[in-house]
Amino acid sequence: MGRKLCSLVLTSCLIFLVAVSTASAAKSGPPKWRRLAKGLEYLVWKVDMCDTLTGQGFCREGKPIVHVLRIDPNLFSFGVYHYSMYGQDAQPMKIEEWRSRLDAAAAFNAGEYYPDFSYMGLLVNSHWLFSTKQHPDWQGIFEAEPHDEDSARARIVDLKYDSFDLRRTTYSQIAQSMMLFDATGAKRIKRSDWSGNRTALAEDEKGRILVFVTEGDYTLWDVAQMLQESPFNLVQAMALDGGYRSALSISYGGVNFSMHGQWETSDYGDVSLPGLKIGLPAVIAVFPRE
């Protein structure tokens, strides 16, 4: 009888714990968006710290916070910019300086660049052909603002599956970078211990564009896995520049916020620099449509 009683008590306790856990999950529900305007939403998303023993979680160092913008491209437009558009004496600008100068609702860093600040891959804004050389290894292209009415206002093109020709495209805003994961669910990056702040650009099932900028330190694999497990119904995503270059500035709908990357770990070790704010040569900005 004693063993049966213990077994019954243990079973009851397990059922109770599962019920409490389920109730808590149901109570917390999905992340709650803050509406800045119709077609523009903002979220401060708390994620799990990485447990190296179990392999669970995502954030390696710093705050496990991700800032997310969800944008309806039918109501908000995108622009791609490089500091060279301001003349020979111009210099890369901090993200809040970019956003203010462009009078944008939000701005975030574009992809990687060379030591001389020229962009790696395609970077185009209408008649400003900042870089027309396609990067041979990057297969993600963000394009926005088509000249025709039938095309999506903004989208991610995956060169593994989609064709692209700069001479024939109807889109005026173009930025190339690497794919994180594609529409088949396949990750397009390799596992690596390199980590840092991360900026990612994704497309969801409704054709909305989502921007993710992390406060903490993540590998690219971490970010891909985190976005695939997220509740945002993402179809595909591409990685923009990370580490010190990861940045976001918002000034719209009652939110005034800027964030600069500070985490970076590579083969040279941990070279993180808390408080660092560097100038960026290239950004993507978001504007309300008139």
Image (tube, rainbow, N blue to C red):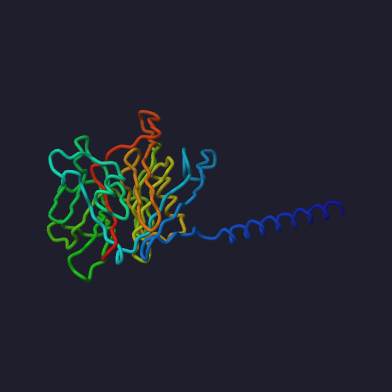
Q: Is residue 199 left or right of residue 9?
A: left
Q: Quadrant of the N terminus?
A: bottom right
Residue furthest to the right in view is 1
Q: Is residue 96 left or right of residue 9?
A: left
Most distant residue in the bottom direction: 150
Picture coordinates of residue 51, whole percent (x, y): 53, 41
**How far across and how far down the image is residue 128, in percent?**
14, 51
Q: Which residue is nearer to you in this view: 245 or 34?
A: 34
Q: Is 12 in front, or is 153?
A: 153
Total labels: the figure holds 0
Residue at image coords 63%, 60%: 23
Name the spot of residue 130 as percent of width and height, x first.
Answer: 16, 47
Q: Is residue 289 left or right of residue 130?
A: right
Residue 38 shown left or right of residue 98 in the figure? right
Q: Which percent across, then down, holds residue 89?
A: 14, 38
Toward the viewer: 193 or 283? Answer: 283
Q: Quadrant of the C terminus?
A: bottom left
- As drawn, the residue found furthest toward the front would be 254
